[in-house]
Amino acid sequence: MISRVMLFSQNLAKAEVFYDLLLALFGAKKMMKNHNAIMWKAGKTGVDFAVYRQDGAVNNKCTNAVVCLQASTAYEVSLIHKAALRLGAHCAGKPSFVEKGVQAAFFLDADNNKVGIFYSETS
């Protein structure tokens, strides 16, 4: 069970601007902010999305994770991917059907965290 998605950033202010705009596309609102972290939550789901200030202790321990965000439609996958790129992300996989009924797109944020946007006809 997932309770929180955690990413790390060397520039928390820049990450805040990026994720404020991107996560608003999912209806998420900022729930907490302090010197070390920012947290967003969409609706009443149990999962929150947080970005933490990166320090030397976690420098190379969080480089292989992919955060997956659920889109409402296949078209929304493309819209959100384009929005992320306009906000400064780098493409890590153009929107495409990865299997029948499942579309995905990927991007890297300013700290090279990989984020996937998915839509599945069965979810």
Image (cartoon, rainbow, N blue to C red):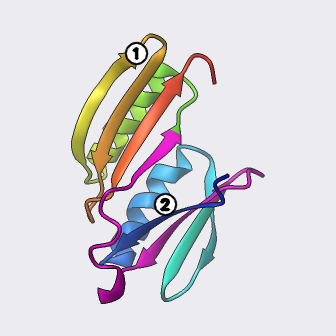
Q: Amino acid at mark 1?
A: Glu
| Whole-percent x, y for residue 104 in the image | 39, 29
Residue matched to label 2: 20
Outermost residue toward the top in this view = 100
**Image point 47% across, 20% down: which residue?**
74
Residue 78 makes an appearance in the image: no
In this rendering, position of residue 93 left or right of residue 13: left
Comparing 36 with 86, the one in front is 36
**Would residue 102 be visible to someone looking at this image?**
yes
48 magenta-colored:
yes
82 over 37 or under it: above or below? above
Q: Position of residue 32 (x, y in %)?
A: 63, 75
Please report whichever mark, 1 or 2, sits nearer to the chain's N-terminal start.
2
Residue at x 38%, y 68% (from the top left corner): 15
Return the x and y of residue 34 as percentages of the image width and height: 55, 85
- Name above or below for residue 60 compared with residue 64: below
Residue segment shown in magenta:
41-69
The amino acid type found where label 2 is placed reads: Asp
Choose mark 1 or mark 2, whichever is in front: 1
Mark 1 to mark 2: distance in Å? Answer: 31 Å
Q: Which residue is mark 1?
A: 99
